Image (cartoon, grey):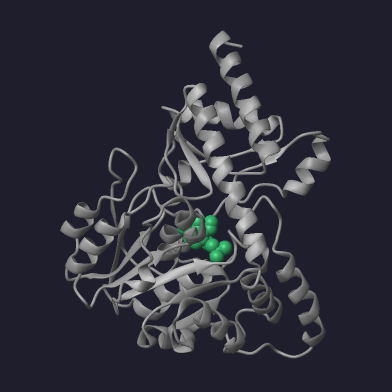
Amino acid sequence: MKITIPPHIATLRGYQPGKPIEQLIQENNWERYAILWNNENPLGSSPKAKEAVTNAFDGSNFYPDPLSLELRQALANKLGKKVENIVVGNGSEGLLMNILKAFCYGDDELLTSSGSFVIIYIWSKICGIPVKQIPLTTDYRYDMEGLKANITEKTKVIYLCNINNPTGAMITREELEDFMRFVPEHVLVIVDEAYFEFSASLHDDFPDSITMGYDNIITLRTFSKAYGIAAARIGYAIAHKDLIKPLLNVSLTFEPSNLAQAAGLGALTDDEFLQRTLDNNKKGIQYFYKEFHRLGLKYIPSFGNFVMIDCGTAERVQEIVDYLKARGVFVRPLNSSGLPHCLRISVGRQEENQYCVEVLEMEAQEAKKGV
Ligand SMILES: Cc1ncc(COP(=O)(O)O)c(C=O)c1O
């Protein structure tokens, strides 16, 4: 091959997808299994989203509305904002990439925490943006004072993941307000609230960054999690209109698809599905805490739909993950997030959670015996 690949692309270790689950299930003939590795919705998808997608398919010979006005209006109504404050995209990941494209150039740097959402490191690298990572605190939280101390004249964007994936920890209202008072107005702060619905249902005073009144915040949210339409690829950003405009400028001409826009519109009306999802999650989190405590596992309290466990060493993580996977229980090792001694378990349906705990207990007993 004579074509040279830029070194920052050639050396990229992108998201590592596994084999499709359906294939693994077919190959292994498991009677019981639990898919708890991607923080997906274990109850399926919003039925109203499904109906809306089915109805929208008939118009698929035409390109979709490039401004996604109907969905943006519906979101604006729901959030008490104007259409000009909302942009939708190919998942919140698509918007994250668009933010980097739209706002960073020259020597601009991105400031964030280590041990956070792995995609931010990958996209920054692809876009050639230097990233300064501040270590997490010893209790796996964003070090807000450390971030403050590291803002320089080169800092263009700060990425805050609230709650943090994969640790599940929250930046509290007090911390976020204090941080925003400190950040200069010319520095853009991305607050990634992919798990907002779960967090708000688990904590009465979860900080909603769209109500804080800062013109330099872009808030990211998604339909992938609480509404169960991860495959449809639809997310949204909320910000001052002058920040939304450049995001519209850099988006693909027809992003997102008509089916994704319809899915979002349908999902937004599905309060029943959302409530069922949040109820299942609340019960699942409490169940995991109780069982992890009983098994002596060191878990980090979570404000989302997943729980991180500190297993002590990377070797122990590998042993547990392999044991579970061989029995149809899929959880996420966190080496690519810079936390090789930890793993993350998403909340599933109660039968999945129970099966996961059973297999964790079997593994612990065998490890103890030295099998
Ligand atoms: C913190 C965070 N942000 C963004 C995303 C991406 O979500 P989407 O499916 O909307 O691209 C995820 C997905 O896991 C996430 O955990």
Q: Is residue 156 left or right of residue 71?
A: left
- Say if 221 sits above or below 201 in the image: below
Q: Is residue 103 left or right of residue 266?
A: left
- Say if 295 sits above or below 21 in the image: above
Residue at the spot x=62%, y=54% of the render?
Answer: 277
Q: Nearer the viewer, residue 150 or 204?
A: 204
Question: Where's residue 34, x and y in %?
Answer: 69, 39
Q: Nearer the viewer, residue 370 or 361?
A: 361
Residue at the spot x=68%, y=31% of the render?
Answer: 355
Which of the 4 image quadrants contains residue 323? Answer: top right
Residue at the spot x=61%, y=11% of the render?
Answer: 371
Question: Where's residue 133, x and y in %?
Answer: 30, 54
Which of the 4 image quadrants contains residue 178? Answer: bottom left
Residue at the spot x=40%, y=52% of the render?
Answer: 116
Question: Where's residue 168, x and y in %?
Answer: 43, 47
Question: Where's residue 280, x and y in %?
Answer: 62, 47
Work out whether residue 131 can be spotted.
Answer: yes
Badge count: 0
Q: Is residue 197 left or right of residue 34?
A: left
Quadrant for the N terminus, please: bottom right
Work out whether residue 38 can be spotted.
Answer: no
Q: Nearer the viewer, residue 193 or 246?
A: 193
